[in-house]
Image (tube, helix red, strand yellow):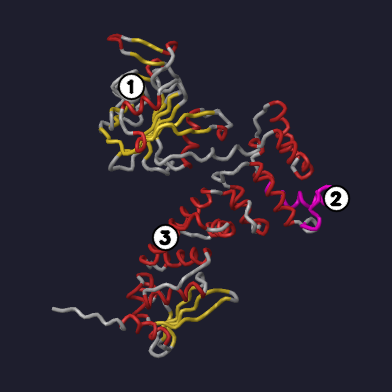
Amino acid sequence: MTSFFNPKFSKDFPLILNNDDNYDTIIQVGENEDIKEFRAHSVILRARSPYFEGALSSSWAKKKNDMIIFNKPNIAPNIFDIILRYIYTGKMNRIEKLSDILKLLIASDELLLEELCDYLREYLTKERYNWIHKDLVLVFYTVRKLANCEFLQNYCFETIYFDPELIITSFSFPSLDKDMYYDLLEREDLLIKEIVAWDYLIIWGIEQTSGLRSLNCDRNKWNNEDYEALKETLNEFIPLIRFTNITFDDFNDKVRPYKNIIPNQIYKEIEEFYDKGIIPKIILPPRKIEKFDSKIIKSRLIRRIIEWINIEDFWISNYNLNLIYRGSIDGISNKSFINKCKGQVKILVLIKVNYSNKIFGGYSSIGFNSIEDSLLRIYEDNHRFYHSSNNFIFSLENDEDTQNMKISRVINYDKAIYDQPHNGFNFGYNAFFMTENHCIINNYSCNYENNIRTDTIYSIEEIETFIIAE
């Protein structure tokens, strides 16, 4: 049988949408002053959208004079117009504004328009790093309105995470509303120099304070009333600054001049920290550590690992993780690992295994190979071990979930690292070890806690090691 396609067929559907005859559905969208009615055909809506299949049923939608009346106040008229035309034509008009694209994805996700969602996700992922500064601000603002749109939550997080300083220092920054700016400054994952956060907090506060705006931003001309006005504006925001991440010189140059706007107890803790090294009780701890170059785990997980390294170390953000070995670049083998990772250093190893979401890792406070003899312990049959009380191994179920992270600390300190020339590394006599392009965690020797033992031999998909420097 020969198939015949009528090229005019797809062009006829817009005519149906624009024709007021024979419609049986009125959809009211928007709220307040921005409300609009759309006329549509229930049979087309139901066929194209699983959402409307249920929403236009007799148990949900209202009927008046044989006309289906449906309200959708949470979608703006301009966004619904795009969606309705897509439903009828399968095409989407070009959209320039990022804020409209984000709103369209949220609405499409809610209306279960899977193909449109896929297209928008692909487009946003491709264009993530090309938005201008003001659009990055809009991305952050939208994240507060996302409901259950998981893709957008991740998208906004990663966009902000990509370069949050673009948001803080963007030209539209001083006009951010109070709630939006509070949410931004509160974030633990806002990777930005704290003195930059402080500088722009002052700029924002001046812009928000009547009498201190651009016409009177010269602090040398301020009186006590001006300082009190700024203090009142920033009262909720000052406690969000991580003052302990500001250097003493920056504190003297940029923070101390504003002493009068800082709550007394916070300022007292700042001075005690600089003068006596006393760990603050009120001031928030540092934000997450600097971004690190990993293809295996998201940066949000590294703080937990650093906390495991030294749970009493308040200055977590002072750690730097420097990549020294990546299997996909340097080769996955014992020889490659040893060549890149030998030496007595604090070192973190991460392994992503094939055909699984599992990730394994280990931390050695003494490194691997070429470790000084004072830490060497030789046992029967000339087995060589190295002493460490801080080592641990761990597992994750995926690259960003902290809920299923498991840790096994070394319990036999004298057998923390096994010196085995046929392994890239070996924690505790096979507690966790690498042999060529495989890794094994069995802990039969019980030199580590027995929290993550497995009899499976895993093929290594990717392996990375980082030197940890303070």
- Indicate which disc residue 121 carries: 3
**Residue range highlighted in magenta:** 213-237
Determine whether, in the image, residue 253 is placed left or right of residue 397.
Answer: right
**In this picture, is 112 found above or below 285?**
below
- Indicate which disc residue 446 carries: 1
Q: Position of residue 201 (x, y in %)?
A: 68, 49
- Few, some or many C-alpha atoms within 10 Å of disc 2 (few <14, some 14-19, many ≥20)? few
- Secondary structure, mark 1, is loop
On-image quarter of the C terminus: top right
- Indicate which disc residue 221 carries: 2
Task: Tell me the mark number nearer the camera, choosing from 2 and 1.
Answer: 2
Q: Which of pointers 2 and 1 lies earlier in the amino acid sequence?
A: 2
- Secondary structure, mark 2, is helix
Is 235 colored magenta in this rendering? yes
**In this picture, is 288 found above or below 63?**
above
Main SS of residues in magenta: helix
Q: Amino acid at mark 2?
A: Lys
User: Which quarter of the figure has residue 314?
Assistant: top right
On-image quarter of the N terminus: bottom left
Q: Position of residue 459 (x, y in %)?
A: 27, 36
* 347 vs 105, nearest the viewer: 347
Determine whether, in the image, residue 352 is placed left or right of residue 217.
Answer: left
